[in-house]
Image: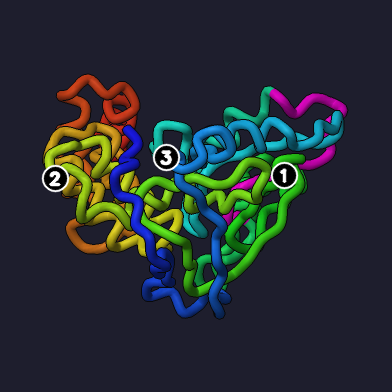
Amino acid sequence: MRVTALLLCLLVPTAQACENSHLPLSGTVTVPTCSPQQDPEHCIYAGKALYQYMGAIPDNDDVLTIGLHASPWRVYDGDMRILTIEELATSSRASLNGKVERVELIGSWTGVSPAPGAPSLAQRLSAALGGVPVSGEDGFLWLSSDGSRRTTRQAFTLREGGGSYYLPKDEALLVSLAAGWFAQAQDVLPENDANLQMLAAAGKDIFLLCPDEALAGFEHAAGIGSAIAAYNAAVMRMERGHAGDRTAALALLEQAAAQGDEKSKALLSLETASR
C-alpha cells in the first residue's frame, strides 16, 4: 500500500538519531522528492527505484554482492523480517565458489560499529564466513541509477512533503528512506493495519536509528496480528538479553508460530530445546 495522500507541501525533518551518541552523525541533508500527481511520467516510487538501481550495480566474478536494508544493528530481508548474521552467512556460502574473493554488504551502516568495541555487521559476517573479507557501508547509503553509491552521516534528513517517498527519474535514492518513510507517516497510517505498522517499526530501526522504539513498534504490530513483527520483536529481545527478554521472546514466537509462521516455529523449537 502506498499512502500517496499523505504528501504535504512543506519541508519537514524526517530523520534524527535516537539515543545513539556512538554513531558519527552531524548536519542536515536534503532529499530530492516529487509528486506523482504532478509528474507521473518522471516521478518514481522509491521501492521501484531501489529495485532498478540495485540491478544496475556492476557484476564482478570475484565479488559476491549482497544488497539489503540494514541498520547498524541488524539486516532485513525483502519482507522486513530480521535476518541473523548466521542466516545470512548460510545463504551466502553456496555462492562462495573458487572465484569469489570478497563480499560487499551493500546496506546502510553495515560497515560501522553500533557500539564501542562492537564489531560491524560486515565484520560479523566475515567472521561467520570463516574470515572471507566483507566490506560494508559507512553511513546512510545512496544509490544512483547507474548503480554507483555513496554515503552520508546526517543527523537530520529534510524532504519536501511527508508520506510515500517518490523521487525524480534518475535522481539518487536514499536507501534507508525507501523503508523509513513508513515510520515518519505512522501517525496517519491505519492503526489496525498490522503490516503497515510492522513496516513503520522497521523504519524506526533502519532510518530513525531508534532500536528501542522499533522494538516497541514491532510488539504493537504483533499485538494486532503481524507474525513477522512478532518474530522480529522476539529476535531483538533475545539479542538484547535484558531481564525478562527471553520469556517475552518465547511468548512472541509462540504467538507467531500459532499463526503458522514457519521461521517462528523453527526458532521456537531451537530455543525451547536449549533450555
Which residue shows up at 55% across the image and 49% down it?
175
Residue that badge 3 annotates: 37
Labelled disc at residue 191: 2
**Left or right of 166: which side holds 224?**
left
Which of 248 and 195 lies nearest the eye of the viewer?
195
Q: Hey, which quadrant is residue 206 in on the image?
A: bottom left
Which of 104 and 30 lies nearest the eye of the viewer?
30
The answer to whether mark 2 and mark 3 are in CB contact below 8 A is no
Compare marks 1 and 2 and give the one earlier in the sequence. Answer: 1
| Residue 98 falls inside the magenta stretch | yes
Farthest front residue in view: 38
Stretch of the chain drawn in magenta: 95-110
Question: At label 2, which amino acid type do we have?
Answer: Glu
Compare marks 3 and 1 and give the one earlier in the sequence. Answer: 3
Q: CA distance from mark 1 to mark 2?
A: 38 Å
Q: CA distance from mark 3 to mark 1?
A: 37 Å
Question: At label 1, which amino acid type do we have?
Answer: Glu
Foreground label between 3 and 1: 3
**Left or right of 258: which side holds 208?**
right
Labelled disc at residue 104: 1
Q: What secondary structure do most residues of the magenta stretch adopt?
A: loop
Question: At label 3, which amino acid type do we have?
Answer: Gln
Circle 1 sits in a helix, a strand or a loop, which is it? strand
Measured as percent of width and height from the top left, residue 99 is found at: 87, 28
